[in-house]
Amino acid sequence: MRQLTVQLEERSYPILIGSGLLAEAPQFFEQYGLTKKSPLLIITDENVAPKYLAGLEQTLRAADYTVVSAVVPSGETSKSLSVYQDMMTVAIEGKLDRSSAIIALGGGVVGDLAGFVAATYMRGIKFVQVPTTILAHDSSVGGKVAVNHPLAKNMIGAFHQPELVLYDVDTLQSLPPRDVSAGLSEMLKHGLIRDEAFAHWCEEHAEELLGLDPEALGYGLERGCGIKAEIVSRDERENGERALLNLGHTIGHAIEAIAGYGEFLHGEAISIGMAGSALLGEKLGAPAGLYDDTVRMLRSLRLPVTMPKHLDTDALMDAMMHDKKFREGHMVFIIPDRIGAARIVKDVPVSAVRDVIELLKEGAE
Amino acid sequence: MRQLTVQLEERSYPILIGSGLLAEAPQFFEQYGLTKKSPLLIITDENVAPKYLAGLEQTLRAADYTVVSAVVPSGETSKSLSVYQDMMTVAIEGKLDRSSAIIALGGGVVGDLAGFVAATYMRGIKFVQVPTTILAHDSSVGGKVAVNHPLAKNMIGAFHQPELVLYDVDTLQSLPPRDVSAGLSEMLKHGLIRDEAFAHWCEEHAEELLGLDPEALGYGLERGCGIKAEIVSRDERENGERALLNLGHTIGHAIEAIAGYGEFLHGEAISIGMAGSALLGEKLGAPAGLYDDTVRMLRSLRLPVTMPKHLDTDALMDAMMHDKKFREGHMVFIIPDRIGAARIVKDVPVSAVRDVIELLKEGAE
Ligand SMILES: NC(=O)c1ccc[n+]([C@@H]2O[C@H](COP(=O)([O-])OP(=O)(O)OC[C@H]3O[C@@H](n4cnc5c(N)ncnc54)[C@H](O)[C@@H]3O)[C@@H](O)[C@H]2O)c1
Ligand SMILES: NC(=O)c1ccc[n+]([C@@H]2O[C@H](COP(=O)([O-])OP(=O)(O)OC[C@H]3O[C@@H](n4cnc5c(N)ncnc54)[C@H](O)[C@@H]3O)[C@@H](O)[C@H]2O)c1
Ligand SMILES: [Zn+2]
Ligand SMILES: [Zn+2]
């Protein structure tokens, strides 16, 4: 088992990564403070439920936990206020109290939704992330939880750190190939921001990662979580440095919103966004070759790097204006200087962004 | 002007109480860190808007603030997820960003709703309480913000402290008599919990308070806010002592839920609840006379002390089980020992509570 800690003083918590961890859930839950006197609520989705829900319920009940479960539709559309309200109803009817905890069993959608339920049920109760996607190595760490507003993604949310991240890598074996690639997009992102060697490692081990080789996966997740944890520890509330983790996300979120949530996977959308950021980087003075290197790395993980032509540029620009990285009238972007180093640029000209959107459409079907 | 501070380290904030403060809002907003570069959103209700909204908007715009406003229906029904979502839409369309602030101009309903919007818009932005009811001397202090779930009150919420409480007592002159009494219910509550002399002062000055005498009102609000601020400073997240502020609220919330939100004013419902707590206190060994004294004080403020017979006891008991003061299987109640002293009792027998509900119905129409 690999173990990391997210250092946040009294809110510090461990990330446990390994094989067979689901079967040991009760002992970890107990060790990290989940009482057996109050019911637990497991929130999961309809793809994950048939594979892992009954097993986890049984394991927990056998250890004397009281368990209630809720299964939401799979995909981004479950990150809505209406599903959120349904979860509140389940929590109340399941008699969860202030000592209860919510267990997010699934990918980033379930993690973000369940985390926001936990952040706001009775003004905040405990929760545990049990990630079942590669992408969730990113979403399960750092305490950002949210649902979407029809006008903009992740607009409604909170900072709420889990008690524990319990990452059973065996669950990843059932992931569809598209979701494998989408998850590797955030893994590579961590390298692109902060660790050149790791970015190259991702490219060099692309085939093992895509083939879900346990050894490669274990190392990749550990290093990905590690970079994220390090940044979050220094800037929990995103007053500065943490914004680097949004590399590719301003364009990516706009693509998700305009194409319609669910059309692109989050990891695919930010892959296109990272290609766009590299183009912006070159426009703002980064050495030529940055875009080519970035695109080659993304392609090695079978990720898209161009934007469908039918996405309306004005609509995309508009969606970016709604994005939360638009602060006090300036357009903020995360721009790479080279592979492994990015910085926050506070006043990127809107015209440069528009040019990049057009360039991203070239070569697309 | 009277000034208090809620001591919460880096989240400390002032409560300013006085006449004519609305006209000086811009200088206070600036002093306490609200930037003019990002739009403000004023949330208010349809009773308060015609009286005070245009004036506040003009004052703020004259001082170069950008202002967006939203007017919600008056009353408890606006503390719902559907109105909450509407407010999010207004905030996004009004281009509020992470440096924006939300201004709650109104009573406890507007304060709780606007505060929860501020707590969760873009994962949390600043907000200012501008209370316009007497009751809001309680709700505007301490950072508890929430909306209701159809199954239980205040079930969905957060802790989110304001930057500032700006209490212009002139606005209270337009309050309907029923809301005056309801607000004085929470004022007396602060005395009943912690300050015998203040409880007697409320009774002795009942006529001045009911008549909205500025001097009496100023002192009563200052002392009420002061007791609340003191308790909140020591226990922001309600891990202990802060629960004392729930005197009368377990029964009160059940009455509000079962009678239908809006049927009883919050202050009226907790008045009945405080009479019930005094009865429970006597049952659990407090000196006889506690109930009579409590009821006399409540009546002096023209508050109800009995429960309508048509409210179903089983339904009330059930609602109490959903209440958040029901923790780890025990029924928790705040019980007065005498006027001016209350304590948290963790395992009140359910049968005693049921008896009290029946007693509260005697003498009612
Ligand atoms: N909170 C954060 O810091 C953060 C960071 C990055 C991404 N996110 C969010 O994460 C979400 C995307 O996460 P995701 O890609 O994990 O999406 P997801 O949760 O929708 O999972 C992807 C798909 O895989 C399925 N699935 C999950 N686990 C499976 C398994 N073990 N076997 C088979 N199928 C499985 C799901 O049902 C879904 O169809 C987005 O909403 C994004 O905004 C949040
Ligand atoms: N957050 C907390 O700590 C806390 C504490 C106590 C109560 N509360 C909440 O506060 C709410 C009750 O507050 P409230 O009694 O102020 O209710 P409210 O906001 O509904 O106001 C009462 C009525 O007075 C009207 N009104 C407000 N100001 C007025 C004015 N100046 N002139 C004329 N009319 C005016 C309103 O439109 C409303 O009809 C409840 O939802 C309760 O749960 C919260
Ligand atoms: Zn992401
Ligand atoms: Zn109250």
Image: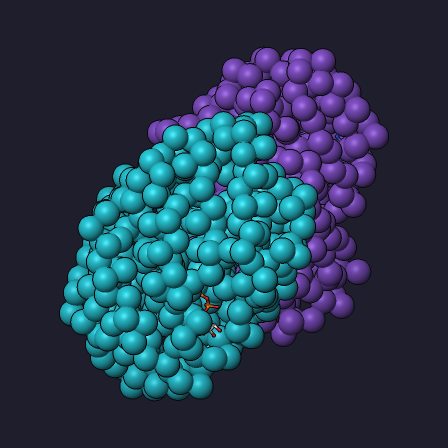
Chain colours: A cyan, B purple
Residue A122 image position (x, y, % from top left) = 49, 57
Please tell me which residue is depicted at 67% across the width and 50% down the height of the picture: A312
Q: Residue at x 57, y 65 (%)?
A: A262
Q: Where does the image place residue B349, in percent across and percent down from the top left?
A: 45, 69
Point out the image quarter for the N terminus of chain B.
top right
**What residue is drawn where x is 73% and y is 61%?**
B260
The front one of A223 and B263 is: A223
Examine the rendering and report whether any part of residue B82 can be seen.
Answer: yes
Give the vertical position of A190 relative to B104 (above or below).
below
- Residue A318 drawn at (x, y percent): 65, 42
Looking at the rendering, in which quadrant would you find the C terminus of chain B?
A: bottom right
Q: Is residue B221 visible?
A: no
- Image quadrant where residue B26 sits: top right
The front one of B86 and B301 is: B86
Q: Position of residue B311 (x, y in %)?
A: 72, 67
Name above or below for residue A325 compared with residue A219: above
Closest to the observer, A12 or B44:
A12
Q: Which residue occupies the foreground of this view, A99 or B121?
A: B121
Q: Quadrant of ligand 1?
A: bottom left
Residue drawn 59% across the image and 58% down it? A308
